[in-house]
Amino acid sequence: MTSLNVSPTRPGVRVDRVDSFVDFESRVGDTTGDVEFKSSQDGRRGHRIMINIQAKRRKLHPSELEDAFGDWVPLRDDGEEIGLEDDGVGDDADGGAGDKRKRYESSDDPMRVWRRMSDFFLDELLRREGMGAGSEAACACCSAALGESDVRVRCDDCGDFVHDGTAGIGPKPPSFPWGFRCPRPASKERDMVVMHFPNIYSIKFRYCGCDVSDHANNLQQLLRNGWYPATTVDPGTCATLATLKVFRLLNVVGNLSIHDFIKTLERSTDAAGLHSVPDRYKSFGLMSRQFAFLLRLMRAGRGHDERGVDGTEEGECAVLCWACPHDGINLPEGWREVAPEFQFLFILILAMDANFRLRNRLRPNEKDDPPLGSGWGYMVEEKEYHEHLRGYVGEEDVSTCVAFQALLQKDTRVTTGLRCSGVGGVVCARHEVVRPQGIGDLQKGERYANMDYILLCSLLGVTAMFLAISYDIACQWRVNFPLRLKEMPERLQLDLARMTLLFALPVWHAAAHERTCQVQNSLSYTAGVGRTDGEGVERVWSRLNPLAWSTREKGRGGRADSIEDEVDYLNFEKNIHLGTTLPRKLVVAIDEGDRQIAGFQQVDESLDDTTRKEWQGLIDSWQRDRTSRNPYAAAEESQEFSSAAIRVQLVKEELEEAVAGDEKLHATSMTAFLVAGLQLENDQLRIRRELKGRPLLVGDQSERVAQLRRSFFVKLARFRKIQGVYMPAAAEQISEDDEGRDSELPPPLAEDVKIYLPSELPPTRRETCSEKLREREARLRRGVLTDCVAKLRRSLLAKRHLVDWREGAVGQRGTTRAATLVQRVEERIDGLAKGYRRSRDALVALVGVADCDWRELRTEDLRVEEELEDDASARRRLGLVGSKTRERRISKAVGKKLGEKEKKKGKQKMSWIWTSGGGPGEHEKELRDAVRVEWSKAKARRDRWMEEVDLLREEMRRVLRFLAWRAAWWEERTVSAREVRGDLRAGLQAYAARQAAMARQIARRFKSAWDTSASDAVRAAVQEDREMEEMVETR
């Protein structure tokens, strides 16, 4: 018999058993095995044999396993029905059906209750600045009486982490005044959660009930103990003042969120999760927000004012810029009477812009939570601001420059689901300090109504003769600003009769505007602003942008207070760093100013007094009235003979012919036909340039060339149809060329195809074309030649600049980059030269050599070196215009170098391309205008750097004056006018004295660092840079 199925892995233990051939399974008791089938030799019978028989493995129940927790059942079912709504978890858990929980203002809106007690909290914090109860008491240790001359010392950390029998290990509770146990504590023991960095403690304590507490209430005991309560009614959560200070620094310096800080405390307290750590995220958010607000009130001196917190005026809590001019603070007596040439020393320069990252989302069911002290710091006052915007209607723009995105999106930015789409801000442009009330929310884009209001709020109380404003859309924003100013609230309106407003574009943003707009509104040409770049507001945004991640989801008040606190720290940091930033800027300004003075003298010495006086008059006139001729822009070239002007003239003539009844041969006019032919020639030049270029990938170049060729032939096919109407002779010429071409050769490529405008036809066939067609092509060719020469001039000047830059490049990367740029310009010059030669040849074919008024362009006419030399010669000639002495010697700096070149190469004539379009008189006029622009710009650069040096020195003096004023201001407050207890009076006096001493110490440090020579400052700056580079390299 033959085996059908034998297991290859088990031993051949067999049990014979005969059964149905179809039954493939067999189970005998608790055994198992493989089945083998055999058939008889005649195939009529079958046998099934069990082989590899083994006992079945017994299957166990989980309860039979050896497990210590096998009998334990988590959450054992006791038979009761489970329903969350039946366990008092619903909304009506505190009462029967329909009953409402009793509401408490202290729990529903704790911030509103706290606002009414802000004076109380401010006084308690100021009280801690002094000796507290020890101001008038005896020694806490020996009870000895203290005299006025005795030095009092209070340990701020006394009693921390002492063991209390009922409290365990934790912060010192109020029942330990002065570090000693209270003899008569309150009878009721209380639970308190205390956040003391880096842990969270749950303790039990009693309030102090003895005379040492001076009958202070519970809140006072907590605050005097250094614990800040989360609520004002029976607080159960506190954070130590040290913890709140640590968090504020981590928040404003490192942008640490409340969530991350609380998680850090929880992990530090119990990383393994062995104990229940109370969640105090919301409570700490309220405490940190209140504490930061109280610190701003303290630094503003509100605790020393008898009017209290509610008497705070707009912008009073903001940190002012120490270096900006403030009348009555850091300006000298009689500053208004200075000579006009020195009035720029007291100019106020502001920069404004919008930030669309600091947006804020609307949240459902959000509680009304206004900011703490709206309008007292850096954010504008909300109520009046929104009232102003409620009357807003669409704004009409005078859009002469639409290159910048902010202008296009100022009314179209998507704001769905947002409370505000961003913020607008105003900062001092030179020191990057945010102005008081210099930030406001933007509801929909960068609208003028918002930005105007924010700017005017930031100018409240400002007294200045000159105000310069840098804004990235100043070219449009300034147009109707005086009209919009009249619609503002009366208290915000500026007296334009007593203040001169200057508007300018930031240096970097100006590149996005049109060229004429750049020159007209450049900060480089605005007198009195030094070398201010106007981009300071962007650097402020870069510091505030990280806030967007946390403030995006915050409520209205929490977001505003977060921005206030961050800006407050940023302003103070900017002021503190003035001690190093101002002298470093001064070193750079002195060095660059010397270079610019020398550069201007080189240009100025070649001028005579008459020319110099004339050009200075243009500058003075433009500075007084920006609508007059701009001395920093070249006179616009005449467009009378350009291609565009000639095309317009031809179209006008065709329209007159149509009116006169002349027959029209085709729907496409004769001018359009010729222009299409010229466009085909330009396409051929483009293909040749593409083939000549050096691509990064050959495949990309081949694909681009193929696309250009396909496009050319499509245009050519349409052109041929029209050509058959206006030029039948061209069709004959094309047929003749096709018959004479070798049929075995491939057809010509797109760049080699002859287009056959009238100028390309043989003379005999050209004569068959209409005279009007030939005359119009000649006029268009002259326009093309005019454009080519103008582009050649600009390209040659660009090449001159790049060659000079290449000579000063250092390193392989710099030289390679410079060489690549020069090569690209040379390729453009080569293409323009070929286009010029092609058009000139066509013009010669049409009118003859004698009547062609355009010269042949040779390679030597395109040299850059001659332009450099000719430019020096042109400056000499311009200086001699109108002078009787034609042989006046040039200045030593230029004359020596020029004389050496003339001796070596001889005097060379200027390339004719610089004289095309007119005779010698026209050329001198053009050169005179070019050098006038160069002289004006060189003078502007020199003047701005000289102004920068003077401004920096005046700013350093203003900083010292401000600090002296601030110290005197605080010293006046050491004697408070408030009727308060002695311990609070001592705290007020101590805080004022500390602030005054700090201001004087900063002033002494600044003056000591600044009281040095310029050479020593340069050496110090170089040494500091060297140390910084070494530190970076070691990292």
Image (tube, rainbow, N blue to C red):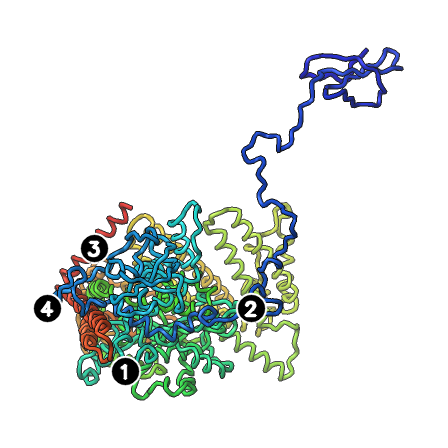
Q: Is residue 471 visible?
A: no
Residue type at mark 2: give it: Val
Alpha carbon distance from label 1 to label 4: 46 Å
**Front one among 260 and 920:** 260
Residue type at mark 3: give it: Glu
Q: Earlier in the sequence, mark 3 or mark 2?
A: 2
Q: Tell me the residue that label 2 is attached to.
A: 675
Alpha carbon distance from label 1 to label 3: 38 Å
Residue 224 on image: x %, y %: 28, 65
Q: Earlier in the sequence, mark 1 or mark 4?
A: 4
Is 450 located above or below residue 239 in the figure?
Answer: below
| Label 4: which secondary element | loop
Q: Quadrant of the N terminus?
A: top right
Q: Earlier in the sequence, mark 4 or mark 3?
A: 4
| Label 3: which secondary element | helix
Disc 3: CA contacts within 10 A as few (<14), some (14-19) or many (>=20)? few
Residue type at mark 4: give it: Ser
**Left or right placement of residue 226 versus residue 260 in this view:** left
User: Residue at image x 54%, y 73%?
Assistant: 776
**Left or right placement of residue 297 versus residue 756 in this view:** left
Residues at circles 1 and 2 in contact by the CB criterion of under 8 Å: no
Is 274 located above or below residue 443 in the figure?
Answer: above
Q: Tell me the residue that label 3 is attached to.
A: 1024
| Label 2: which secondary element | helix
Residue 463, numbered circle: 1
Alpha carbon distance from label 2 to label 4: 101 Å
| Label 1: which secondary element | loop
Q: Earlier in the sequence, mark 2 or mark 4?
A: 4
Residue 149, numbered circle: 4
